[in-house]
Image (spheres, rainbow, N blue to C red):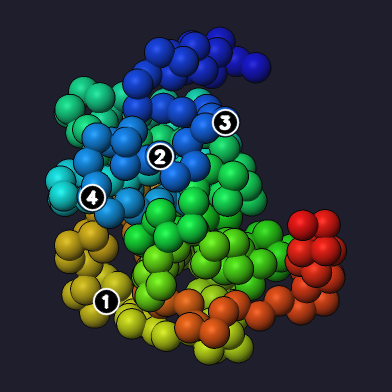
């Protein structure tokens, strides 16, 4: 591990707004923030630029950026501390273990911003049905999930998945900037988004909520769910 990474890992150990693999936070996030404001998650947050941006825009909501890489979280966590954004925190953890850290109905919204499209493995995409099933276990009913991406493959895959699941689409913008829709939360730009725009890439956005009758799993994911239910 590089020297700079080690410095960042060491730094976040002392950051009050960073929790690393906590054992007792499930159902206690409002106590952590010291208020009962709604909680929004940014998944695979990287440097946490979106979590910080959302926190700046809305002080009446709490935002948690989640990523497994602590050296990336460092950037957003440090910015939030410097700007006294008490409504922004970071969780170092695996997204697949979301239910270990959040209780049912504890989360009111999810943002997925420029996540890895996993072109060779669809099941790793954060809008795959196995992840949607995971999200519904911590979201309030009717909560919105936001995807912002430069990947046409991920955009089309998400549209197909949510159509198959019977999700409700609230917004579907195939070219945010071309249509002049980069306002409010969509105006926040990460380092990678700025780079993509400089390269002339199109930015896509979908906002949707999960079906009332639940996300349907198939194949090995359905079998795994049945096995886990049997163990209970």
The residue carrying pointer 3 sits among few (fewer than 14), some (14 to 19) or many (20 or more) residues within 10 Å by Cα, namely: few
Q: Which image quarter is the N terminus in?
A: top right
Relative placement, left or right, of 121 versus 177 is right
Query: Alpha-carbon distance for marks 1 and 4?
Result: 34 Å
Mark 1 lies on residue: 178
Question: Quadrant of the rendered structure where residue 219 is?
Answer: bottom right
Residue 141 placement (x, y as % from top left):
41, 72
Of circles 4 and 2, the one toward us is 2
Query: Alpha-carbon distance for marks 1 and 3?
Result: 45 Å
Query: Alpha-carbon distance for marks 4 and 2?
Result: 12 Å
Mark 4 lies on residue: 37
Mark 2 lies on residue: 28
Looking at the picture, tell me which residue is in the foreground, 197 or 18: 18
The residue carrying pointer 2 sits among few (fewer than 14), some (14 to 19) or many (20 or more) residues within 10 Å by Cα, namely: some
Question: Quadrant of the rendered structure where residue 48 is?
Answer: top left
Is tag 1's residue or tag 3's residue first in the polypeptide sequence?
A: 3
In contact (CB < 8 Å): disc 4 and disc 2: no
Of circles 1 and 2, the one toward us is 2
Mark 3 lies on residue: 23
């Amino acid at each position: 591990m590089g020297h700079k990474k080690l410095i960042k890992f060491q730094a976040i150990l002392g950051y009050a707004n960073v929790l690393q693999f906590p054992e007792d936070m499930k159902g206690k996030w409002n106590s952590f923030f010291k208020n009962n404001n709604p909680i929004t998650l940014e998944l695979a947050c990287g440097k946490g630029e979106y979590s910080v941006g959302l926190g700046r825009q809305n002080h009446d909501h709490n935002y948690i950026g989640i990523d497994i890489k602590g050296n990336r979280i460092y950037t957003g966590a440090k910015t939030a501390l410097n700007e006294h954004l008490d409504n922004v925190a970071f969780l170092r953890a695996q997204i697949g273990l979301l239910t270990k850290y959040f209780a049912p109905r504890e989360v009111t919204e999810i943002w997925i911003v420029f996540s890895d499209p996993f072109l060779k493995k669809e099941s790793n995409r954060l809008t795959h049905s196995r992840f949607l099933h995971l999200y519904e276990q911590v979201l309030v009913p009717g909560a919105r999930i936001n995807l912002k991406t430069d990947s046409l493959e991920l955009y089309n895959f998400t549209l197909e998945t949510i159509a198959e699941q019977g999700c409700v689409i609230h917004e579907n913008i195939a070219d945010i900037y071309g249509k002049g829709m980069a306002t409010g939360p969509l105006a926040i730009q990460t380092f990678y988004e700025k780079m993509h725009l400089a390269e002339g890439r199109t930015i896509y956005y979908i906002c949707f909520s999960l079906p009332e009758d639940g996300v349907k799993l198939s194949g090995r994911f359905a079998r795994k769910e049945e096995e886990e239910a049997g163990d209970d």
